[in-house]
Image (cartoon, helix red, strand yellow):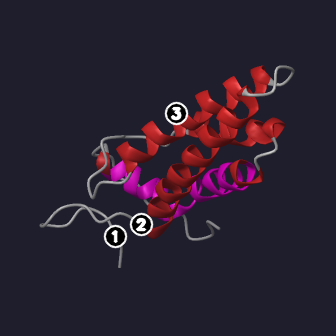
Amino acid sequence: MNNYPTSTGLKKPGKLQAIAILALVDGILSILAGIGWLFTICLAPIGIYSIISGIFALIYATKLLPDVPTVRQPNKTVAILQIVNIISGNVVSIVAGILSLVFYNDADVIAYFNALNGQQYDVPANYQ
């Protein structure tokens, strides 16, 4: 049974909820790490990047967390920003970014976003 549009509304796949929670936690940790880096004169640019990456992750997480998200497509840019945030030493960011990219390619998540956009999507039988 699919988790897509029903008569009562849309039901999000668990992996999409996991992406939202990972982005929320990563956004908070990235902002805190960025503030810490700002206090060091030499590494202030790394702190600025970490704060910007954290803000983007928080904004995306708040749009993805409601039962019916306001986003209509996966935001792979935020996941890539999270992976690049390893330059600030934030290991949580790289884990969150990689898991987000993997979860975006899940058949249920793809079908859910297509259902949000009103498109029909049939998962191939050999899709993994």
Magenta stretch encompasses residue 30 = no
Residue 123 visible, this angle: no
Residue at mark 2 to residue at mark 3: CA–CA distance: 24 Å
Q: Residue at x 58, y 37 (%)?
A: 54
Q: Residue at x 71, y 52 (%)?
A: 98
Residue at mark 1 to residue at mark 3: CA–CA distance: 30 Å
Lateral position of residue 105 relative to residue 123, left or right: right
Locate residue 37, reporting x and y percent: 75, 32
* Residue lying furthest right: 42
Magenta stretch encompasses residue 109 = yes
Locate residue 83, reporting x and y percent: 74, 42
**Where residue 13 is drawn, which disc sits there?**
2
Lateral position of residue 24 relative to residue 4, left or right: right
* Residue lying furthest bottom: 1
User: Which residue lies under the disc numbered 1?
Assistant: 3
Question: The residue under label 1 is which amino acid type?
Answer: Asn
Q: Pick the residue in front: 30 or 93.
A: 30
Q: Is residue 119 above or below residue 7?
A: above
First to last magenta residue range: 94-115
**Where residue 125 is drawn, which disc sits there?**
none
Residue at mark 2 to residue at mark 1: CA–CA distance: 6 Å
Residue contact between numbered discs 2 and 1, judged by CB atoms under 8 Å: yes
Label 2 or label 3, whichever comes before in sequence order: 2
**Where residue 55 is drawn, which disc sits there?**
3
